[in-house]
Amino acid sequence: MSVVFVMAPLALLLAAVAVAGFVWAARDGQFEDVDTPPQRVLLDDDPDRAE
């Protein structure tokens, strides 16, 4: 039973860190453009390379 007193606050702390990280990323604009990066891989033609 004493393990619960250690693990419950640890789990709450870990969840709070995860939520804080998500809020930071959302405010920083990390999730603004979700369409361009996958398309950039398909359209990446480098004319300087001669293969």
Image (cartoon, rainbow, N blue to C red):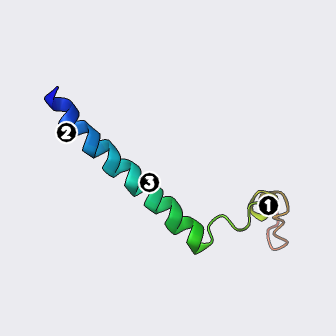
Camera-side residue of 10 and 30: 10
The residue under label 1 is which amino acid type?
A: Asp
**Which comes before the other along the chain, label 3 or label 2?**
2
Q: Which residue is mark 1?
A: 35
Q: Tell me how far mark 3 sits from mark 2, CA to CA.
A: 19 Å
Residue beneath label 2, please?
Answer: 6
Dot 2 alpha-carbon crowd within 10 angstroms: few under 14, some 14 to 19, many 20 or more: few
Tell me residue 25's x, y (percent): 54, 66
Earlier residue among tags 3 and 1:
3
Q: Nearer the viewer, mark 3 or mark 1?
A: 3
Amino acid type of the residue tagged 3 in the rendering: Ala
Q: Residue at x 83, y 57 (%)?
A: 42
Mark 2: amino acid: Val
Please provide percent x and percent y for residue 41.
77, 59
Total number of numbered labels?
Answer: 3
- Please state if 12 lies on the left or on the right of 31 as rendered: left
Q: Residues within 10 Å of mark 3 (few under 14, many from 20)?
A: few
Q: How far apart are labels 1 and 2 at the CA level?
A: 43 Å
Q: Secondary structure at mark 1?
A: loop
Please tell me which residue lies in front, 46 or 44. Answer: 44
Residue denoted by label 3: 18
> Is the residue under label 2 in contact with that under label 1 (CB below 8 Å)?
no
Mark 1 closeness class: few <14, some 14–19, many ≥20 residues within 10 Å: few
